[in-house]
């Protein structure tokens, strides 16, 4: 069934006017007509069943019927990613959202050589990923800041899986063994790696958990996907899903 992210408040009987892109998708691409069902969510009120109430020239209007799932959120997991080339950054955002990341924080490091960041485009990718994966929370994409400024304000209770490929860090599964879920972040550096000063700063951070992703040098998108996958398998909601099955 089609799932759409909407900004409207959701309640029984509410009527939702879709924007032009959504209307075109529902009417022209997916060939839905009056009375056809679909699912909607806004990241606040859970997921709801709705039907197409009007599919005229002015766009589609939906009528909300009943809630299908109450609002919930996945694990409190952030991805902190150094800016990389645009296409790879878009892939990282998409896959991070598919893997259950609650936030993606963009950072500028000493060796960052970024393209111009289009936050609107990244947010659109996050919305589409949430629609397709069945999420009912919306991942947040946070505008770039300097790595040092982010670390200056790092929350005391949030652990940081620091993917350190230049030191003597243990394998990531060993580093995560025995760790509690709680608030976490995964940090992936730029293609050129962290500078010695940045590595020293990260190593001095009490919340940092250094780890290596193996014997091969990974591109940033591969490293992000790998680290998030391994974290989910050890500390995330994959274990919860397996237990509930």
Image (spheres, rainbow, N blue to C red):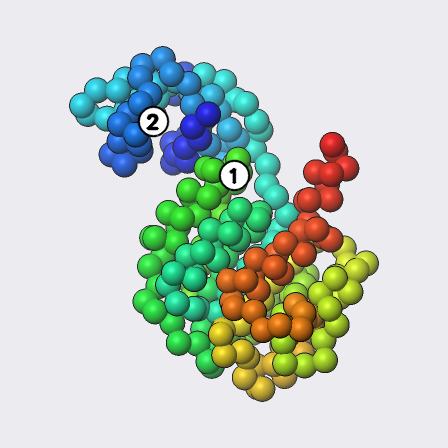
Which residue is pictured at 51% across the width and 49% down the height? 97
Q: Which residue is mark 2?
A: 30
Tell me: 26 left or right of 155: left
Is 9 situated left or right of 169 in this image?
left
Q: In terms of depth relative to the viewer, which is nearer, 237 or 14?
A: 237
Q: Residues within 10 Å of mark 2 (few under 14, many from 20)?
A: few
Residue with the most extreme bottom position: 196
Q: Quadrant of residue 163?
A: bottom right
User: Could you say where residue 45 lies in the image, as x and y percent from the top left?
Assistant: 50, 31
Front-lying residue, 10 or 202 = 202
Label 1 packing within 10 angstroms: few (<14), some (14-19), many (20+): few
Q: Is residue 126 left or right of residue 171?
A: left
The disc placed on residue 133 is 1
Kindly tell me whether residue 51 is visible in this rendering: yes
Q: Where does residue 43 sit, x and y in percent of width and height?
A: 49, 38
Task: Measure the alpha-carbon separation of dots 1 and 2.
Answer: 18 Å
74 with respect to 144 (left or right): right
Task: Give the mark, 1 or 2, whose residue is nearer the N terminus.
Answer: 2
Residue at the image point whose x is 75% and y is 66% from the top: 175
Q: Relative to 207, does residue 5 appear above or below in the rendering?
A: above
Decide: is 77 above or below 146. above
SS class, disc 1: helix
């Amino acid at each position: 069934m089609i799932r759409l992210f909407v900004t409207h408040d959701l309640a029984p009987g509410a009527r939702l006017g879709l924007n032009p892109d959504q209307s075109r998708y529902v009417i022209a691409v997916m060939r839905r007509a009056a009375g056809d069902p679909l699912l909607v969510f806004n990241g606040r009120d859970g997921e709801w069943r709705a039907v197409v109430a009007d599919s005229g020239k002015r766009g589609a209007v939906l009528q909300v019927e009943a809630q299908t799932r109450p609002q919930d959120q996945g694990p409190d997991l952030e991805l902190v990613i150094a800016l990389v080339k645009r296409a790879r950054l878009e892939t990282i955002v998409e896959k991070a959202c598919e893997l259950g990341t609650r936030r993606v924080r963009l950072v500028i490091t000493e060796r960052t050589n970024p393209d111009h960041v289009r936050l609107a485009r990244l947010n659109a990718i996050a919305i589409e990923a949430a629609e397709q994966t069945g999420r009912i929370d919306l991942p947040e994409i946070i505008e770039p800041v300097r790595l040092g400024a982010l670390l200056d304000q790092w929350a005391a209770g949030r652990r940081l899986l620091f993917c350190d490929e230049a030191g003597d860090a243990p394998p990531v599964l060993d580093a995560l063994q025995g760790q509690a879920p709680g608030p976490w972040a995964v940090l992936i550096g730029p293609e050129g790696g962290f500078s010695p000063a940045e590595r020293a700063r990260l190593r001095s951070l009490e919340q940092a958990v250094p780890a290596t992703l193996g014997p091969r040098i990974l591109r940033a998108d591969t490293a992000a996907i790998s680290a998030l996958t391994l974290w989910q398998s050890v500390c995330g909601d994959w274990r919860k899903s397996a237990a509930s099955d």
